[in-house]
Amino acid sequence: MHKASLSAAFAILVAEISVNTGAALGKGLFPLVGPEGVASLRTSIAAVILLVLIRPWHVTASRSQWGWLVLYGLSLGSMNLLIYWSIARIPMGLAVTIEICGPLAVVLLTSRTRQDFLWLAMAVCGIILLTPWPGSDASLDPLGVLFAVSAAVFWAIYILCGKQASRIGGRTAVALGMATACVVTVPFGVSHAGEKLLQPDVLMLGAVVALASSAIPYFLEMLALERLSSRVFGVVTSSAPAIAALVGVIMLGEHLALHQWAAIALIMSASAGCSLTSRPEKVAEPERISTELSA
C-alpha cells in the first residue's frame, strides 16, 4: 500500500479509537446526566464546533435538498440517542456490532453480487449469536438489543438521506445535520437532566466527549477520504466493533463471552468482505457518509 494510503488508513483507525473512547467517556457520565444528557451534550457541543469551523451560512439548496437535510439530521440525532440508551444496558462493543448492521444492510441492498449471500449469511449468524434467547445464562438485556437494532435502522436511514443531503456539500451537510440532530437529543437531555447539563464539570466532560466522538473523527476521516478508495475505507472502518469491544474492556471492564467475540468477528468479516466485493460506483457514497460522526 502507498505510504499516503497507509497514513490515511492509520488516521481512520485513530478516528475509530477516538469515537469509541468518547463513547466510553460518555457512558461514565451516565450517572450524572443519563444517556439522554450525554447525547444532548455531544450533539449540541459538536454542532457549535462544526458550525464555527465550517460556517455554512450562505448555503443554497432547493426545497427537496432541505427536506433531505432535515431527515438526515433527525436520523443522526435518533441514532445518537438510541445507541446511548443501548450502551447503558449492554456492553459497548456489542451495541456497536449490532449498530453496524445498518450500513452493512445498505451496502448489501445496493450491491447484488453472488458473494453478497455469503456476507449476509455471516452477518445473520453473528446476529443470532447476539440474540438474547430466553433462558440463556449469557443473554443480553432485550431492551438494550432493541435500542441497538433501532440505532442500526436509523444509521441506514442516515446513510440514504445523507447521500441526498451531501449534494449541497458534504461538510456543510454534516454541520447543519448535527445542528438539526439537536432537535431530537436536546429535549430529552433537558427533560432528564435539566440544569445539571450546565454544571461546569459536566460541560467540560461533555466537550471532551463531543470532541472525541464527533469533531476529531470527522476531520480525520475527511483527510483520509481524500487518499483512500471507498473499498479500503470500508475495510478499515469494519474494525469498529472490535475497537469498541476492546475500549469497553479496557475503560469500562466490559468483558465478553467467547460466543460474543465470535459474533463480532462474523459481522466484521461480513462488513469487510462486502466492502471488498461490492461495485465501487454503488457503495462509495454510502460508505463515505455512513461513518461520518457515527455513534
Image (cartoon, grey):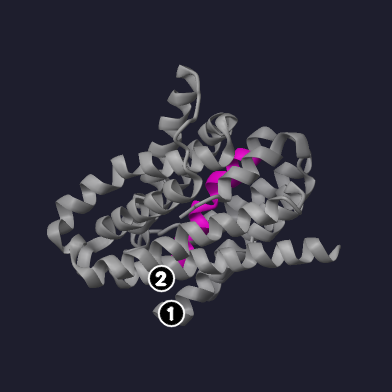
| Residue ID for mark 2 | 24
Residue at 61% x, 59% y: name it: 220
Count numbered badges in the picture: 2
Percent position of residue 231, x then y: 75, 49
Residue 52 in sight from this viewpoint: yes
User: Is 205 drawn above or below residue 231 in the view shown?
Assistant: below
Q: Relative to residue 266, is residue 40 drawn left or right?
A: left
Placement of the N terminus among the 4 image quadrants = bottom right
Percent position of residue 226, x then y: 72, 50
Q: Does the magenta stretch include residue 100?
A: yes
The secondary element bearing badge 1 is classed as helix
The magenta-colored residue range is 91-107
Percent position of residue 50, x then y: 45, 50
Q: Relative to residue 188, is residue 88 drawn left or right?
A: right
Q: Which amino acid does label 1 sit on?
A: Met
Outermost residue, top direction?
Answer: 63
Q: Cβ–Cβ below 8 Å for labels 2 and 1? A: yes
| Residue ID for mark 1 | 251
